[in-house]
Image (cartoon, helix red, strand yellow):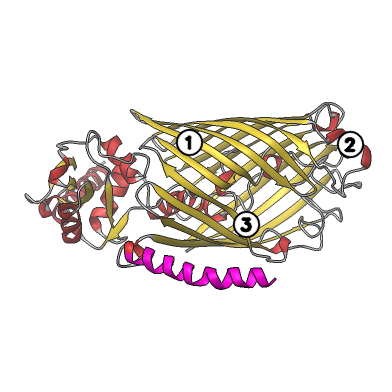
Amino acid sequence: MRTTKYFTRRVLFTLVVAMLASGVALAEVVVVVNPGSGVSSLSKGDVKKLFLGKMKSLPGGPKAVVVEQAPGSPARDVFNAKVLKKNDKKLKAYWSKMIFSGKGKPPEQVANDAEVKAFVSSTPGGIGYMDGSAADDSVTVVLTIP
Amino acid sequence: MTTNTNNVKRAIPVAMGLALTSSMALAEDWTDRVELGGFASANFHVTDEAQSFNGPENVGYDKQGSFNGTRYALNIRSFVNDRLSFSGQVLAAKEEDYAVHMNWFFGSLAVNDNLELRGGLIKFPVGLVNEYVDVGYSYLWLRAPAVIYSELGPPNGPQLVREAYTGGSLLWNQSVGDWTLGADVFGGEVALEGASVRKTLGVTLRADWSDTVQFQFSTYEGTMMGVDNASLDADMAKMMEGSEHRATLVGVKADWNDVIFYAEKGHVTMGDMKAMKGSNWYATLGYRLGDFTPHFTYQSLDQGEGEDKQTTSTVGLRWDAMSNIAFKAEFSRIKTDAGVGLFQQGSPASSVNMVGLGADLVF
């Protein structure tokens, strides 16, 4: 009984530490668009469709120009897991179907948050994702992924 | 000949001029407008039966073992502008002695976000995986299930899907909530070995829920013409000539968390031919365990009353070794209850074992 209690405490402690640690490493990921697009919010479903090439324009806005971060970026891992629900291998298989049947092409890829911000703020219809702490007035946050 | 040479001479400066003008008109860097990609698959199959399975010796598999199915392809897509693009794929396969040929190529015009017009040599949009059937990396199996995707000619082959057609299509796509709905109306001509299917007209309807579950329905018909295939006897060739070839397929595919599921059923008729009233189906279940995906597939081939009947059970393993390379191993048991099924004419054993190994990559 005592051992069980001790074990439970240890598990709880570990969980709390893990949660705090992940919270420090990454606050939240936000989806941002070019402020000129006139779009102020997007649903998770629409964002998923835009990033998988199933939707071509921002709802009620211009043609979408999608940008993603390169493999290895922390924001990419969160975005792909929570919005696209695909890891890198699943995503690779998805795009290999689209590319090799002539149906579509994966988004443009940049290295990090700063490059996403530069791309989105200077591209009409631009849409990308980044760590919440990197967003500023040059882009419009349309979705927050906790 | 002289005229030809003159034409060529005249064409060269024109082409150079065009190339210069277009390169100036386009973006500074042509790589902005052209995308390249490729894939390759290496396959090896061996059975314990002398009769070749899924094609004659130079195409199928027998107890000598064979690398048939090994292939290499390059894709190119160039954008003329936001609406107009050209795409093509060159492919070389072991069973064609690696002779490079255009697998497909088409021009595509996006009328708006929902409508697209295509013209060219277009991959046949029937069957869940047919448009990317050569890209082994994109699915679990070594080869897509033969009872639906085999290219083996009549009377043995399923005759459900075709490689590609020359013609045009109108594609429609619409997103509604979590669903993406699509329709592909296509028409043209299919070239087969020793025959062609003219006036082919068909439609494929798709419904995709959140990129998790996909339903697909296809139906098409065409007229068999110029039937002159060495593997057919004269009577059968005569019966096929001018006959109406009809097929209907339904399929469902799911990829939910770590579970992968495929099921397809196809029905075909060719005029009144008794041997071509086939009804085939398969189901696949796979489960991702990290980089490994074990899977099981059951296939059933039924070419009509009193005709060939065959089932195949396959257990397989896909290993995603690197982000763009997968290795595969499969073991199959092929049971022939009537006729020869997908074996070559002869008397194959009623139960045949087959082992397959392969590697797939995309780049």
Q: Nearer the viewer, mark 2 or mark 3?
A: 2
Q: Is residue B322 visible?
A: no
The lab-note entry on whether marks 3 and 1 share a chain reads yes
Give the farthest residue toward the left.
A137
Q: How many marks?
A: 3
Q: Using the numbered discs, state the Cα–Cα distance from disc 3 to disc 1 in whole angstroms.
A: 37 Å
Say which quarter of the image contains residue B199: top right
Q: Considering depth in this image, is B91 or B27 the residue closer to the camera?
A: B27
Q: Does the segment drawn in magenta span residue B62?
A: no
- Precedes in sequence: disc 1 or disc 2: 1
The subunit letter for the residue under badge 3 reads B
Q: Considering depth in this image, is B205 or B285 the residue closer to the camera?
A: B205
* Residue under pointer 3: B329
Regarding mark 2 in the picture, which secondary structure is present there? helix
Position of B205 with respect to A108 (left or right) is right
Task: Identify the residue at image location x=76%, y=57%.
Answer: B59
* Residue B163 image position (x, y, % from top left): 65, 47
Categorize mark 3 by other alpha carbons within 10 Å: few (<14), some (14-19), many (20+).
many
* Residue under pointer 1: B171
Position of B339 with respect to B20 (left or right) is right
Task: Identify the residue at image location x=38%, y=63%.
Answer: B22
* Residue A74 image position (x, y, % from top left): 24, 57
Categorize mark 2 by other alpha carbons within 10 Å: few (<14), some (14-19), many (20+).
some
Q: Does the segment drawn in magenta span residue B5?
A: yes
